Amino acid sequence: MLSEPVLDLLRSQAGVVARHQIRLLEPDRERRRTIYADPQLDVMSTRVLRHRAVPSSRQQTVMAAVLDAGPGARLWGKSGSTWWGFGRERLLPPHIAIPRARRGPTALGQLHVVSCLDPRDLTHHLDVPVARPEVIALWLAGAWTHRYGHEIAFERTEKVVDQAWRQRLIDGHYIHELAARSGGRGRSGIVVFRQVLRKRPPDYQPAGSRLEERFEELVSPAVRRRLRRQVTVDIEPVIRTVDYRLDTWPLIVEINGEAWHSSLTDRAADQERYDRLLELGFSVVVFWEYDIWNDAPAVRSAMDRLIAHPDTEPTLHRPTPAPWDC
């Protein structure tokens, strides 16, 4: 019968356990042999056992690969970016990093021997040991630089960094500190990585969507410099964070996608949100998805006009009709 400590490990690790973990829990060799021979356990590899009652899953496959690589191993590289949710690479076979070379390959994943895995760079996500998103982004910058060259690597690294930052997976101060301590001639990707961060200070806030990115492309540089992205303005759930806030006077910019703001319930919620912002002393300007993609002059002129002539009292501005009024 499996001991409670072993069962606890199985519960926390998607139904898999490594032999080296059992050795730590059960010092007695005969007791370990009994556990290894338990009919409830199946052999996944020479190093990893699986409980038969736990159904197979992606988490189990990834966890087994990490355990199979040995103590200190972490999900890494392309698999790591997909596990965090900011990459579009294949998760399987799992890419695994180990802190030093070992004899023989892992049977359940693709191994990367990393010269040093700093404890600061390691964490857990969905209960799986994994490198931090910032570290994975640096590794991807190196892999892309090596394969495609500087220009393509820069474009791809920009996208993954912004996506991870948008999902609030990136710590601005940490990623800059990582770039500073990861220097050294010959470090693949560090030039691209630092170039990406040059325009992204520690307090950087990326646009919340491609729609917002398009809005920023439309407005003049003078307007764009005064806008702060994804700002929390109220503790009430009806508002919390707004798309943009103007630095020079209390103006809020909201960018509405038609799929999420056109139903009757959405319209009521939005009106409640605008009323609350007006109560707090903000003016609000609302642009629709159609405006952003099809009426750039109207968006640009409306923003220029609002910047040039600030409201004396909180006002709701709708430069173009809502979809249901057209």
Image: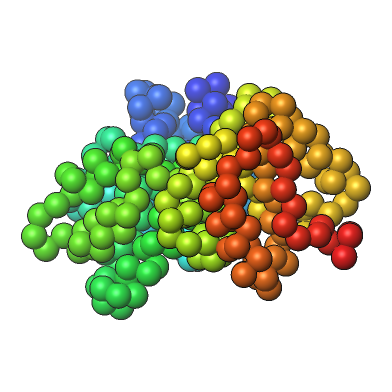
Residue 100 in the image, given as x and y percentages of width and height: 20, 49
Q: Give me the residue at 67% from left, 48% from top.
A: 285
State whether residue 287 is above or below residue 173. below
Residue 241 in the image, given as x and y percentages of width and height: 61, 37
Residue 186 in the image, given as x and y percentages of width and height: 11, 63
Q: Quadrant where the N terminus lies?
A: top right
What is the count of numbered marks? 0
- Res 45 visible: no
Residue 317 in the image, given as x and y percentages of width and height: 72, 48
State whether residue 220 is above or below residue 144. above
Outermost bottom residue: 148
- Coloured how? rainbow
Q: In this view, does 183 lie to the left or right of 138?
A: left
Q: In which quarter of the image is residue 27?
A: top left
Q: Quadrant where the C terminus lies?
A: bottom right
The one of 137 and 244 positioned closer to us in this rendering = 244
- Res 34 visible: yes
Q: Give me the residue at 36% from left, 31% from top.
A: 23
The one of 191 and 88 positioned closer to us in this rendering = 191
Q: In this view, does 167 lie to the left or right of 201?
A: right
The one of 164 and 238 positioned closer to us in this rendering = 238
The one of 284 and 257 positioned closer to us in this rendering = 284
Q: Give me the residue at 38% from left, 40% from top.
A: 203
Q: Give me the residue at 55% from left, 57% from top.
A: 304
Q: In this view, does 76 lie to the left or right of 13?
A: left
